[in-house]
Image: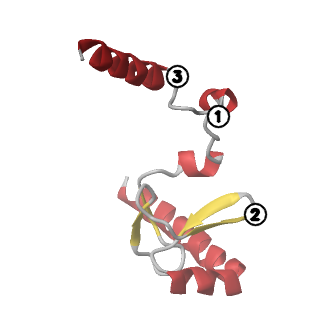
Amino acid sequence: MKKFFVLVIVILAVALVFGCGKKKEEAAKPEQAQPAQVEETTGQITCVVCGMAVDTTQVKIMMDYEGKTYYFCSEEDKAKFEADPDEYLKKEEEGAEEAKEKEGEMH
């Protein structure tokens, strides 16, 4: 009986060490790298459509446009952006310029 338990323990240990039947290619495959835009914009940003705060580590609604990843607080806002991205990017750019002007006035 002791031999049986020892055998079971040895089999389980071997299975854990060798990946429980995973192919060597799968076990050795490195994880896919995320796009640079996602890594650069982790944390709190604002939805480009409505300005609401969006946590990029939690959000699931996003899209790539012209090489940049944009995050949205809702599917509705994403649809609005898809319909006319240049309009929202223009507003975002104007808002960034306004913020720079205000920052310059404060210093």
Is residue 33 found left or right of 53 in the rendered image?
right
Between 68 and 13, the one lying in front of the other is: 13
Looking at the rendered structure, which numbered label has been put on residue 26? 1
Residue at disc 2, secondary structure: loop
Q: Is residue 43 left or right of residue 20?
A: left
Q: Closer to us: mark 1 or mark 3? A: 3
The residue where tag 3 is placed is: 18
Element type at marker 3? loop
Query: As rendered, which of 68 and 99 lies closer to the eye?
Result: 68
Using the rendered view, name the quadrant where residue 6 is placed: top left
Depth order, front residue of 25/101? 25
Q: Residue furthest front?
A: 1
Asked if disc 1 and disc 3 are in contact, CB closer than 8 Å, the reply is: no
Place of residue 65 in the rendered image (x, y in percent of width and height, measured from the top left): 71, 66
Mark 2 is surrounded, within 10 Å at the Cα level, by few (under 14), some (14 to 19) or many (20 or more) other residues, namely few
Residue 20, percent across and down?
50, 31
| Residue 80, placed above or below residue 29 | below
The three-letter code of the residue at mark 3 reads Phe
Alpha carbon distance from label 2 to label 3: 43 Å
Three-letter amino acid code of the residue under disc 1: Glu
Q: CA distance from mark 1 to mark 3?
A: 12 Å
Pointers 2 and 3 in contact (C-beta within 8 Å): no
Residue 35 position in % (x across, y down)? 65, 48
1 or 3: tag closer to the N-terminus: 3
Label located before the other in sequence (2 or 3): 3
Q: Position of residue 85 (x, y in %)?
A: 68, 78
Q: Using residue 2 as the reference point, say whether residue 65 is left or right of it.
A: right
The residue at which mark 2 appears reads as: 66
Q: Nearer the viewer, mark 2 or mark 3?
A: 3
